[in-house]
Amino acid sequence: MALATDPQPGHGGPLVIENCAIATMDGPRHDDTGAEHRSGHIVVSGGRITAVGEGSAPADAAAGARRIDGTGCLATPGLINTHHHLYQWLTQGRAQQSSLFDWLTELYPVWARIDAAQVHAAATAGLGWLALSGYTTSTDHHYIFPSGDRGVLEAEITAAAGVGLRFHPCRGSMDHGRSAGGLPPDTVLEDPDEALAATAEAVRRFHDPSPSAMVRVAVAPCSPFSVSSRLMREMAELARGLGVRLHTHLAETREEDAYCRQTRARTPAEYADELGWLGEDVWLAHCVHLDEPAVKRFAVTGTSVAHCPTSNARLGAGIAPVRQLLRAGVPVGLGVDGSASSEGTTLAGELHQALLVARVRDEHGPAALSARQALWLGTRGGAACLGRTGEIGALRPGMLADVALWRVDTLAHDAIAHTAGPSGPSGADGDPVAALVFGPPAPLELLLVGGAPVVERGELRTIDISAAARDVRAARRRLAT
Ligand SMILES: [Zn+2]
């Protein structure tokens, strides 16, 4: 992997973006997303935003700053990806017509052979791809450790540092295999005591609680059908003792719902509740199959949800009740999920998907979710999932300078962005937020992480993406042999 530069938070130097539309996402709620500017400025210094507003930047703003002309662009907070499995970049396109359990059963034995070097190649490719789609923070959920850690978590943390993104690796685990009534073969399991010790060690080595952190670790046993009740409980205790967040899969498919009712005599949400897995420090992936009491319980406990619309559609899992969750006050973020169940999807694509599937699912049809609510999911909702509200996900002075600048003057976007007509929120001047969400993925003019440029004019500044593609192709071939 070739590194062109070595970006560090706040090392990008002072910078001023001017003449662009701005969606601050600084409002109080998903249905009141805050100030927008038709032609405004953003000033960045020391890795943080120091000014945002309409018109030109103040003359004395950030003396000596690099000035960027954002004409034809829309600035938003950098997108936040709340669920991923980067190693799956190596196994895309398999089990194309399988539901989740069959898909997993086909892939577990392949994943069991993946080593740290392959994870590094997959993570570099996957994170590079997501940076090009406008995200500035991502999670990853790695849960296959049949021979212990062997440097796997470190490999993906190194990859994220190379690409220059904020990274929340979730240390997963599985101890409940086929011989005990679980789904995975016993050969991919980890000893529960070793998993607890390795997870604690990962937090000790890599977790940074500071407000400008580039790496934070979460505790993340895999799912109700691959982890024992004992390990779920003990992982929750471990995470709370260490002061880090908890993450797992929940209520993804009807098969999982049936599995929990049969083996635990509870719905997945009731089971999670019983294990101490609902709370303000928990975010849960998918949550497609929730009944009304579960939605209420999530709201009361402050539990967050990572909505993964493309993956859920690809596996035929269903569509999460996002409108109901939001109306109940549950924070909802977006996730691309693993590369093998969403095949190179982008977060900008997930904004679009979330908008469409909510309207397909819900009795309210096109009123189920607005373009601004979709953008809220990808920014503020994501920050809430990761416990980083007040640090990332909005553009206002004091926030970390994680900014995406999108071109909305292309052939496909210009008509919506600049002449949408009087029925759009911005009237006859057009609606750049609608252009971003309703339209095809917009070209990325600039991506800042902590003020440091990671993407400029659609190209990664930090890594050689061609070399990353070569590395991951070689890793994939090695895995296939
Ligand atoms: Zn997943």
Image (cartoon, helix red, strand yellow):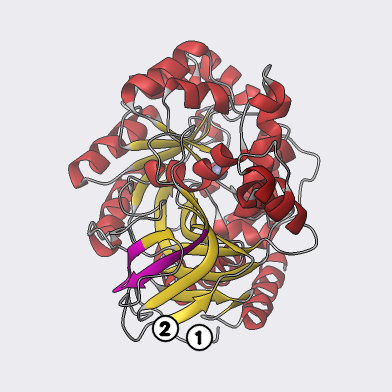
Query: Residue 21 in the image: x percent, y percent?
Result: 55, 58
On the question of residue 430 being in view, the answer is no
Is 457 placed above or below 306 here? below
Q: Which residues are magenta?
A: 39-51
Residue 28 position in % (x across, y down): 37, 36
Estimate how packed mark 2 is, as few (under 14), some (14 to 19) or many (20 or more) residues with alpha carbons within 10 Å: some
Q: Is residue 345 above or below residue 285?
A: below
- In this rendering, the answer to whether 122 lies above or below 394 is below
Dots 2, 1 in contact, CB < 8 A? yes
* Magenta-colored stretch includes residue 381: no
Residue highlighted by disc 2:
6
Marking on residue 3: 1
159 and 130: which one is in front? 130
Residue 79 spot, x, y in % from top left: 51, 54
Residue at position x 60%, y 17% from top? 258
Residue 101, position as x, y percentages in the image: 66, 34
> Which quadrant does the N terminus fall into?
bottom right
Q: Secondary structure at mark 2?
A: loop
Q: In front here: 345 or 349?
A: 349
